[in-house]
């Protein structure tokens, strides 16, 4: 069962070629839209457009499951069942769950992948489905799987990002790095031998009794999968696939791990720690954090913010105005301040901006009649990132970061900067 652990709100819209569905068209009966694809039977009461997008998501992520685990998922005898409801009540009824609090689950007894939407941005719902959908894939296509591997791979796929042609997996969110690096420095990580041999019962016991350890074990499992897939230019990748095959046949997961990676757990842990320390957040997450920081700092300008009509104005206010003193910090460890102007200047730039001389990569726009401006980045393949200020009811606007993804789109979704703004770039 997936709890929502993501700290950044996002909205995802994915368009894939119609041929990717391959099987029968959309049907509607008794308030439920239904669509059969090559590998999935998808049902939802949200909307016909959502149902089609959902089916496209699942087919695309299935290809990634199968691609990353060569030899599994080649022959599917029956379609996987997926149900996404608009309400929690219907979700509970469909799954038989008695306790509220989850956003999605794969029920092995019902052979059902399910989630509910409510007011949750669709991106967060889809990420839950990527996670729980991997559990469904394991159940149908692999069989036996140690809990650390099942959850670690599910977390790995939950971070997948559509690039316009396929999913990019292996994204590195800064909040995961912050959690793991803090645990490493405070010596609170789980011993490697303990993690790879942890029983299903012990994993669930931590989930019920120790929230802090649960956070570490999920992120450490993600980190170990990432290490085995990417460390040292894929040094462990083939051994990792052999390990997945072996644990399907050998109930002794420790013996299987030692057979594929050796017996020196301490050396493996040391290499893993060095790898985690060496990782950098993916550009998409860097931009999301920078846009969040810019929107927050604009809002914090108070009475002066109406004078800050462009990001060039905001940059001048923060970096060049005499006596300016400010500080921004987020839960994942991102920090900017007036004390380090060079680092603060990077806050205005997208890592993927090809114009190395531009001082500002992003655009700030306010449409007629809107209370707050939006802050946008369009430098990522097939992605437009937007930060918006939304009133929370207490007069303190909160920043919401949204992500729009499409396989085909106009060359530039962000309006061109005004002459004044362009001149200051």
Image (cartoon, grey):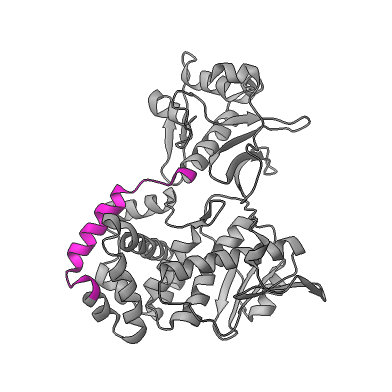
Left or right relative to 4: residue 219: left
Q: As displayed, is residue 189 above or below residue 364?
A: below
Q: Is residue 275 magenta?
A: yes
Residue under the point 34% across and 86% down? 249
Across and down, in percent, residue 97 comes to 61, 78
Residue under the point 32% across and 51% down? 181
Q: Quadrant of residue 126?
A: bottom right
Residue under the point 76% across and 64% down? 48
Residue 340 in sight from this viewpoint: no
Q: As displayed, is residue 322 above or below residue 148?
A: above
Residue furthest out toward the top:
322
Q: Is residue 102 magenta?
A: no
Q: Quadrant of residue 362?
A: top right
Across and down, in percent, residue 193 comes to 25, 72
Across and down, in percent, residue 173 comes to 44, 51
Which contiguous range is marked in magenta? 260-284
Residue under the point 29% across and 55% down? 233
Compare residues 402 and 420 and report the one nearer the observer: 420
Left or right relative to 150: residue 267: left
Q: Main secondary structure of the magenta part?
A: helix
Left or right relative to 340: residue 261: left
């Amino acid at each position: 069962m997936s709890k929502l652990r993501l700290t950044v709100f996002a909205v995802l819209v994915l368009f894939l070629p119609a041929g990717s569905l391959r099987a029968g068209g959309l049907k509607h009966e008794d308030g439920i839209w239904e669509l059969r694809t090559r590998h999935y039977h998808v049902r939802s009461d949200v909307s016909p457009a959502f149902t089609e997008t959902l089916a496209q998501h699942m087919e695309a992520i299935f290809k990634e499951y199968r691609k990353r685990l060569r030899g599994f998922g080649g022959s599917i005898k029956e379609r996987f069942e997926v149900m996404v409801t608009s309400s929690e009540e219907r979700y509970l009824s469909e799954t038989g769950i008695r306790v509220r609090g989850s956003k999605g689950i794969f029920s092995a007894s019902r052979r059902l992948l399910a989630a509910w939407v409510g007011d949750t941005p669709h991106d967060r719902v889809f990420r839950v489905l990527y996670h729980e959908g991997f559990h469904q894939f394991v159940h149908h296509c692999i069989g036996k799987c140690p809990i650390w591997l099942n959850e670690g791979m599910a977390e790995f796929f939950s971070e997948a990002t559509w690039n316009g042609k396929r999913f990019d997996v292996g994204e590195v969110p800064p909040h995961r790095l912050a959690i793991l690096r803090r645990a490493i420095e405070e010596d609170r990580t789980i011993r490697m031998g303990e993690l790879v041999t942890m029983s299903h019962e012990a994993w669930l016991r931590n989930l019920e009794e120790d929230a802090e350890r649960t956070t570490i074990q999920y992120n450490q499992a993600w980190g170990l999968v990432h290490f085995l897939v990417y460390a040292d230019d894929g040094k462990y990748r083939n051994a990792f696939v052999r390990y997945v095959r072996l644990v399907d046949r050998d109930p002794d997961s420790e013996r299987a791990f030692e057979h594929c990676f050796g017996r020196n757990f301490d050396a493996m842990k040391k290499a893993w720690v060095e790898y985690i320390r060496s990782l950098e957040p993916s550009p998409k997450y860097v931009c999301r954090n920078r846009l969040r920081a810019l929107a927050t700092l604009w809002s914090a300008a108070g009475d002066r913010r109406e004078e800050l009509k462009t990001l060039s104005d905001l940059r001048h206010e923060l970096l060049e105005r005499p006596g300016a003193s400010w500080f921004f910090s987020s839960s994942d460890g991102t920090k900017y301040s007036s004390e380090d102007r060079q680092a603060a200047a990077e806050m205005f730039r997208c890592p993927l901006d090809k114009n190395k001389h531009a001082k500002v990569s992003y655009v700030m726009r306010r449409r007629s009649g809107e209370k707050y401006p939006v802050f946008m980045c369009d430098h990522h393949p097939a992605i437009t990132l937007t930060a918006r200020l939304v009133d929370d009811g207490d007069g303190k606007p909160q920043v919401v970061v949204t992500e729009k993804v499409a396989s085909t789109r106009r060359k530039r979704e962000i309006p061109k900067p005004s002459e004044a703004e362009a001149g200051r770039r």
